[in-house]
Every structure is written in C-alpha cells, then in structure tokens.
Image (cartoon, rainbow, N blue to C red):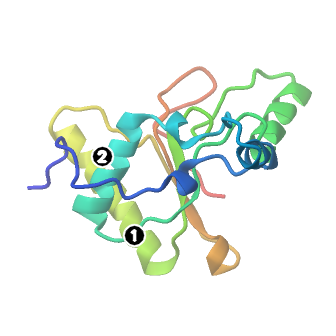
C-alpha cells in the first residue's frame, strides 16, 4: 500500500522552481531584496503532497515550470484586468494562493503523471481524507518543451468550483 501520510525522504523541488519568475520578483532578488514572490509562499501541506506523489506514486522527476506567482506576475495581472473589464470579482487562482504548480511533461510522462495524481487523490478518498489536488489540468498542445500539467489545490469557493478540470 502507498503511504500517503508520512513525510518523504527529501524535498524534490528547488527554491528556483517554486519562486515567482516575473520581472518584478527577479529584479527584487537581484537587488538583494526579499521578493514578494519567494518560494516560501508555497503552502507546506501542498508541497508535502507533491513530494509524496513524486516519491511514492509517479517515481519520476516533476520539473516545475511555474510555481508560486505574485499578483504582479503578467499572467495573474491579466486575469485581474479581465475580471475588472467584465465587471466580475477577481478570485485568486492556485498559483498566487501558493497551491498551484505547472509540471513540464508531455506524451507518456504526462499520461502517467495524471494517473499518479488521480490515484493519489483516490487513496485519500478511500481513507476518508480530503483530496489534495482539486485541479489536474493538462496543456498538451504546441511544442513539447512548452507542454505542462497544472496541479492545483484550491478549495471550492464562489466563482471557483472545485474539484474542476480544464484543458488549455
């Protein structure tokens, strides 16, 4: 049986992978300032689940192409602007809440990672535990080096239904 509760033997994800990579945060880091988009904004419980999937279910590298994003990150700023233009409230997504990553995989690795995430969620459900991954959403179009699977852990909220899957 796969252990879904005890800590893993190590953390498989680097600070560089998990921190915000927007120009503002990069500039703050290069100036020696504490960037608002630091990797410590990723929730510890979410990182623990990612490490367990990596070590105990998927058993392959999970290169994070986008981890935490500050609210000034271009993608997050675009979402806020669009919500304002549409007269809707802006609800923070997984990345700026510290419970979202994009893992760069494609082909059979993408298939196996999605299976691993669903198995991990299923094991939680079988043990009457909350399912940690509420969004497992693939982007498998375009050049291979740009493909990814979004893994999110936000909870259900008004304007943000969870669990929920989408494709890009």
Residue 27: give its label.
Answer: none
Q: Is 154 situated left or right of 140 in this image?
A: left
| Residue 89 pos. (x, y %) | 76, 20
Q: Is residue 97 above or below residue 165?
A: above
| Residue 136 pos. (x, y %) | 47, 51
Residue name at image x 16 percent, y 43 percent: 6
| Residue 70 pos. (x, y %) | 69, 37
What is the spatial separation of the Cα atoms under label 1 and label 2, in whole angstroms? 19 Å
Q: Is residue 97 above or below residue 53?
A: above
User: How many C-alpha atoms fall within 10 Å of the one at disc 2: few (<14), some, or many (≥20)?
Assistant: many
- The answer to whether residue 43 of the structure is visible from this angle is yes
Residue at image mark 2 = 121
Q: In front: mark 1 or mark 2?
A: 1
Name of the residue lying farthest toward the front: 32
- The answer to whether residue 118 of the structure is visible from this angle is no
User: In which quadrant of the rendered image does the C terminus lie?
Assistant: bottom right
Of residues 31 and 130, which is closer to you in this image?
31
Helix, strand or loop at label 1? It is: loop
Q: Is 35 situated left or right of 115 in this image?
A: right
Q: How many marks?
A: 2
Residue name at image x 39 percent, y 65 percent: 113
Of residues 101 and 143, which is closer to you in this image?
101
Q: Quadrant of residue 66?
A: bottom right
Residue at image mark 1 = 61
Helix, strand or loop at label 2? It is: helix
């Amino acid at each position: 049986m796969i252990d879904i509760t005890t800590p893993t033997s190590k953390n498989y994800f680097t600070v560089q992978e998990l921190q915000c990579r927007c120009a503002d945060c990069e500039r703050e880091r290069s100036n020696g300032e504490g960037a608002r988009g630091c990797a410590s904004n990723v929730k510890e419980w979410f990182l623990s689940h990612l490490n367990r999937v990596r070590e105990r279910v998927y058993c392959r590298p999970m290169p994070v192409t986008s981890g935490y994003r500050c609210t000034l990150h271009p993608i997050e700023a675009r979402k806020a602007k669009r919500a304002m233009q549409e007269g809707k409230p802006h609800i923070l997504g997984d990345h700026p809440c510290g419970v979202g990553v994009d893992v760069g995989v494609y082909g059979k690795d993408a298939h196996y990672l999605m299976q691993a995430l669903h198995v991990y969620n299923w094991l939680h459900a079988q043990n009457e535990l909350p399912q940690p991954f509420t969004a497992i959403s693939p982007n498998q179009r375009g050049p291979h080096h740009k493909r990814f699977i979004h893994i999110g852990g936000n909870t259900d909220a008004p304007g943000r239904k969870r669990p929920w899957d989408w494709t890009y």
